[in-house]
Image (spheres, rainbow, N blue to C red):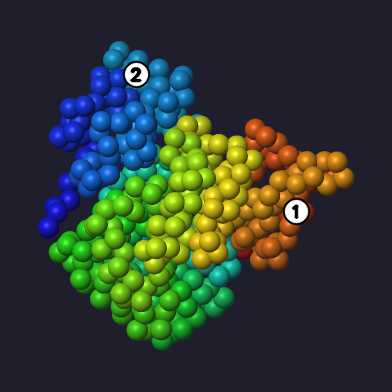
Amino acid sequence: MKKYQSYTLQNYGQIPQSVSLSREDRQAIEVVGRVLPFKTNNYVTEELIQWDQIEDDPIFTLNFPRRKMLLPQHYKEVEALMTNGNDQQLRTAIEKIRMELNPNPSGQEYNIPEFNGIRLHGLQHKYRETVLLFPRPGQTCHAYCTFCFRWPQFSNLPDMKFSIKEDYELYIKYIKAHPKVTDILFTGGDPMFMNASLLRAHIEPLLSPALKQIRHIRIGTKVLAYWPYRFTTDEDADEVLRLFDNIIRAGKHLSIMAHFNHPIELSTSAVKEAIQRIRNTGAQIRTQSPVLRHINDQPELWAEMWRRQVGLGCIPYYMFVARDTGAKHYFEIPLAQSQTIFRKAYQKVSGICRTVRGPSMSDHAGKIQILGISEVAGEKLFVLRFIQGRNPDWVAKPFFAKYNPAATWFDQLEPAFGEKEFFFEHELSNYLRDALERDLGAY
């Protein structure tokens, strides 16, 4: 049985292979790791990273801070204060830099509802059918992705963290009070960091006959890629799988929303066994990832990843655009390139892999998909649509933006055909204004 060992800024020197880290590598870890969270583990370091090729190794880049993940001026400031400043000056500078990195992207604060006079900081309700729950013990991960848009969850930013702090029964009452809610997504952090008893305590209330409205339970997790032993040899692995089986027996659909960013993460015997054990319970595994420079910005990698996933019985679900937060400047690619990567990868696979949707941006208004690039009446355009929206009436309506080859996020696009705003913007502005006044978030 493999015993879990985590590595952080304090003990990364204990990684046996870390002897290969150059002085520059170590300095980057020390500087960037003060601003953006750093954590990895012995499965990643022993079975995924190719230590003789770390300059270009995608898994090393997914786990270890690199110098360019901070803007040059931010890196120089932290580096100088680590050498010549005092602790208070360093803490102040780090806090200021973090706030400049858009720690709360896509208006997540608007998604937090109030119920019985209490603001539910461990719940987001952006879309009519779906509620996100943030179990407090699950607000960490087995390893931290360097691109992660939820990096404030793991940083010293208490006002930016989403976590269930109140009596959990209040959250169950909120769900009962909203009968159109059919889907619950447990997210984090990583809910699969919790032990089986904690998982059961959060999930079993949803299996009650009083909540027959709940049809689908989803668990967002990176654990299959970063610690597959969670489902094989961990002490409570069998208990976790029995819980999955109980969810299915209760008549609920269970989807494990698995984050895989590169085909290498699907290559080990450990992950293959873990996937099979999950599927044996009747649960589905749906896969998703952002498209990332330095990691997977080649259509061949995506096609290979989707084929491997389908071969293992998983369902390709989403290709995302990297959120506009944290180290986005390091990972981002133009939207036009993202769409080209998706289209070329899509062309390389059979229909059974084409369950995947993307590239998709999780914007204030909803999940906006880039359907393609076209030309209408002599004007080059992005063709877009909502996969999901704050207002369900927006969903699946094609709309158009001027082609911008440099744009990397939706807020850099302009409406096409001389329009002053996109079709939904007036309604969205009114909603956001009213939400601020009501201190409510759910549409």
Which quadrant holds the C terminus? bottom right
Q: Amino acid at mark 1?
A: Phe
- Total marks shown come to 2
Front-lying residue, 74 or 231: 231
Residue at 32 percent of width and 36 percent of height? 60
Dot label at residue 399:
1
Q: Which residue is mark 2?
A: 79
Question: What kind of element bears circle 1?
Answer: strand
How far apart are labels 1 and 2 at the CA level? Answer: 46 Å
Q: Position of residue 361 (x, y in %)?
A: 58, 49
Which quadrant holds the N terminus? bottom left
Relative horizontal placement of residue 309, taking residue 84 as reference (left or right): right
Do labels 1 and 2 touch, CB within 8 Å?
no
Disc with the residue nearer the chain's start (1 vs 2): 2
Residue at 40 percent of width and 47 percent of height? 262
Front-lying residue, 183 or 229: 229
Relative horizontal placement of residue 300, taking residue 360 as reference (left or right): left
Front-lying residue, 161 or 296: 296
Counting other residues with Cα less than 10 Å from the Cα at mark 2, is it few (<14), some (14-19), or many (20 or more)? some
Counting other residues with Cα less than 10 Å from the Cα at mark 1, is it few (<14), some (14-19), or many (20 or more)? some
